[in-house]
Amino acid sequence: MSRRYRHHRSLIASMLAVAVLGGLAACSNGSSSSSQAGTGTPTGTGTPTGSAAGASALPQGSEPVQLDPATFTAEIDNPYWPMVPGTIWVYSETDADGTKLHTEVTVTDQTKMIAGIEARVVHDVVSEGDRVVEDTFDWYAQDAAGNIWYLGEDTKEYENGKLKTTAGSWETGVNGAQPGIILPAQPQPGMAYRQEYYKDEAEDQGAVLSLDEFAKVPFGSFRDLLMARDTTPLEPDVVEYKFYAKGVGPVLTAQTSGGFSQEVLLKQTEGGG
């Protein structure tokens, strides 16, 4: 709900209203989403080749992009997800089957060179009780326009304390893997983009739906949230909605198709101190 206070509850908001501790809600101004990139697409330094060529295009599907390492930085200050080293987000997740998970996301002071680009290393650990079930290192970098690019991940899933699989791991430029955008520099409703592409392993897609949502989670109440829809052709029945707060980052994720689950922000410790 934005400061214009002229909104009606959307279908998404109604589904999310069943949220944790009775404290989660979302409101929409009725802006519609689109499967195509809308007007106002940010000018990025990663220029897709082929049918979507042009500096103003966001990456789509499996199309290759050519990124200039000189225009990238590991210092990420996009307002919707600033990644200051030392920052920690702690989330509580309830899966569709009722499983309770605990997630800690830490922006490390480490970087990794990927396709000539210095990327920030973010460590994501998911636990069920006292057991780690997933341990992932994600690699992000920001271009000169402010787009946050996703350059790959090293992920491991565990079962009963033993490594189960590394499926989903990928790195830009290795075996045809292509980078994508996690958040555009100047998001506008209707923008659609590839988040990652590694054939048959990682093919997430994102779309900006709104910039004026409201949500209440254990960490606090937030207005003017960016709401994005995440999908993948690898699991066509699954749809996730993510909510980003300026100056904080992701505060809420809700899966409303293919089973209901939700992840809410419990606390954030800011880095850089």
Image (cartoon, rainbow, N blue to C red):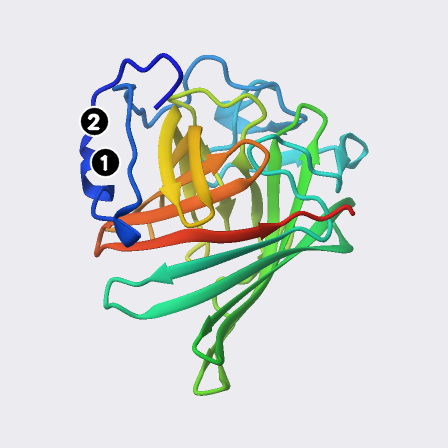
Q: Residue furthest right?
A: 70
Callout 2: few (<14), some (14-19), or many (20+) C-alpha neighbours within 10 Å? some
Which residue shows up at 66% across the image and 51% down it? 87
Asked whether 115 or 128 is in front, the reply is 128
Q: Is residue 131 left or right of residue 108?
A: left
Q: Find disc 1 in the rendering and name its residue.
A: 12
Up the image or down, 168 lies above or below 81; here it is below
Res. 198 in view: no
Identify the residue at image location x=55%, y=33%.
80
| Residue 159 image-quadrant placement | bottom left
Residue at left offset 55%, top offset 21%: 186
Q: Quadrant of the N terminus?
A: top left
Answer whether residue 273 is visible to the viewer in this image: yes
Front residue (pair 67, 17) = 17
> Up-down: is 154 above or below 78?
below
Q: Where residue 273 sits in the image (x, y, percent)?
A: 78, 47
Q: Is residue 222 left or right of residue 44?
A: left
Q: Which residue is mark 2?
A: 9
| Element class at badge 2 | loop
Q: Position of residue 81 (x, y in %)?
A: 58, 38
User: How many numbered callouts?
Assistant: 2
Q: Which quadrant of the view contains residue 88?
A: bottom right
Cα–Cα span, label 2 and label 1: 8 Å
Residue 128 horizontal/vertical position (percent)? 42, 75
Q: Amino acid at mark 2?
A: Arg
